[in-house]
Amino acid sequence: MKPTQATFPATRLRRQRKSPALRALVAENTLGPGDLIWPLFVRDGEGVEEPVPSMPGVVRRSVDKLVEVAREAHALGIPAICLFPYTGADKRTSDCAEAWNPDNLSNRATRAIKSAVPDLAIMTDVALDPYSDTGHDGFVVDGEIVNDETVEALVKQAMSQAEAGVDIIGPSDMMDGRIGAIRTALESGGHHNVLLLSYAAKYASAFYGPFRDAVGASGALRGDKKTYQMDCANSDEALRCVARDLAEGADMVMVKPGMPYLDICRRVKDEFAAPTFAYQVSGEYAMIQAAAQQGWIDGDRAMLESLMAFKRAGCDGVLTYFAPAAARALQ
Ligand code: PBG
């Protein structure tokens, strides 16, 4: 039966989906290893690879093992890794002094990786939570997370990371004024080429749970982080955070978590046209891995689909625990 003029669809969008070749031709976005930043957990010891139970496939590594995966990351075409130290209760103090110890775990790892794989970019995290006995990102005085005293400590932490040789510093603490303070210290301390990737729009989120296990903060954390991380009800506020951090000297900005906040990624990219990243956080990773382990979804396809969503939302790159698996799938 031949369709009549009146009944055939005027626009057949299915034509362009007919074959892999045509789909490739009209693809609006691309995803490659170059879009990925790989977050890695570092712990003390030697030859250690210790699984994180709530993040299947993720391990905490001692520095020597970290150097091996840094080589692997570089070989896979992943441009950057991001270091997070796991700190035992013995190194957590109320003054958080370990945060700016030139020989702390993060700084030792940075030096070891830089000398072994100089072309791989290293990002580090600025926040006090790996070093505080309260699990908070700032100092706690009379139940309040104090801002300005915390910023002074964050500056010392950032400077010790710059001295160790990091390429990118990522303040994830959400204190007010820290980007400007760190930028000023970097400039006057001879580190004008160190980039700042501000966790500008970071929400108080249930999706950070597995990460807090991974860095040993779950047991320590008292209360929640709602007086400094953003309320999930807000999106205009995210734009104000980003505007402020760019004005204070951030080179790049981040939205965190990722998948539940793709609307924020899009607004930030449209408004500022700055390098924009999203953090597909531990809970997002854990959800996909858990469902895949149950056989309820195809893990590899869900991984790649979730990562492409960030590109579609306007992100230039994604911090993701899937980085090595995704880079392999995309070779
Ligand atoms: C803390 C920090 C957190 C994450 C990165 N840096 C947790 C928090 O704010 O409590 C979470 C990352 C993840 O969940 O994968 N400075």
Image (tube, rainbow, N blue to C red):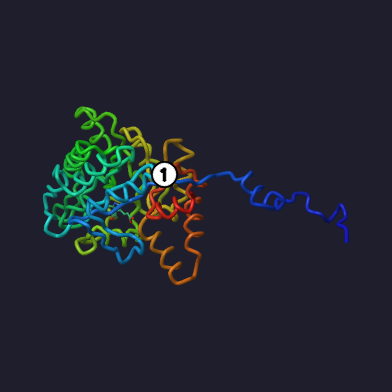
Q: Please state which of residues 61 and 289 is positioned toward the viewer in this rendering.
A: 61
Quadrant housing the N terminus: bottom right
Tell me if 301 is positioned left or right of 6 in this view: left
Q: Please state which of residues 309 and 16 is positioned toward the viewer in this rendering.
A: 16
Tell me if 99 is positioned left or right of 1 in this view: left
Element type at mark 1: loop
Q: Residue at x 18, y 49 (%)?
A: 105
Rendered view: 164 above or below 23: above
Ligand 1 picture quarter = bottom left
Q: In the rendering, at what x and y percent does residue 16 appear?
A: 69, 49
| Figure quadrant of residue 112 | top left
Q: In the rendering, at what x and y percent does residue 184 appear?
A: 23, 31
Rendered view: 214 above or below 39: below
Q: Residue at x 13, y 44 (%)?
A: 101
What type is the residue that disc 1 sits on? Gly
Mark 1, Cα crowd under 10 Å, few <14 / some 14-19 / many 20+, is: some
Q: Residue at x 11, y 54 (%)?
A: 93
Q: Please state which of residues 185 and 285 is positioned toward the viewer in this rendering.
A: 285
Q: In the rendering, at what x and y percent does residue 180 appear?
A: 26, 34
Q: In the rendering, at what x and y percent does residue 191 appear?
A: 24, 30
Q: Please state which of residues 174 and 78 is positioned toward the viewer in this rendering.
A: 78
| Figure quadrant of residue 107 | top left
Circle 1 residue: 77
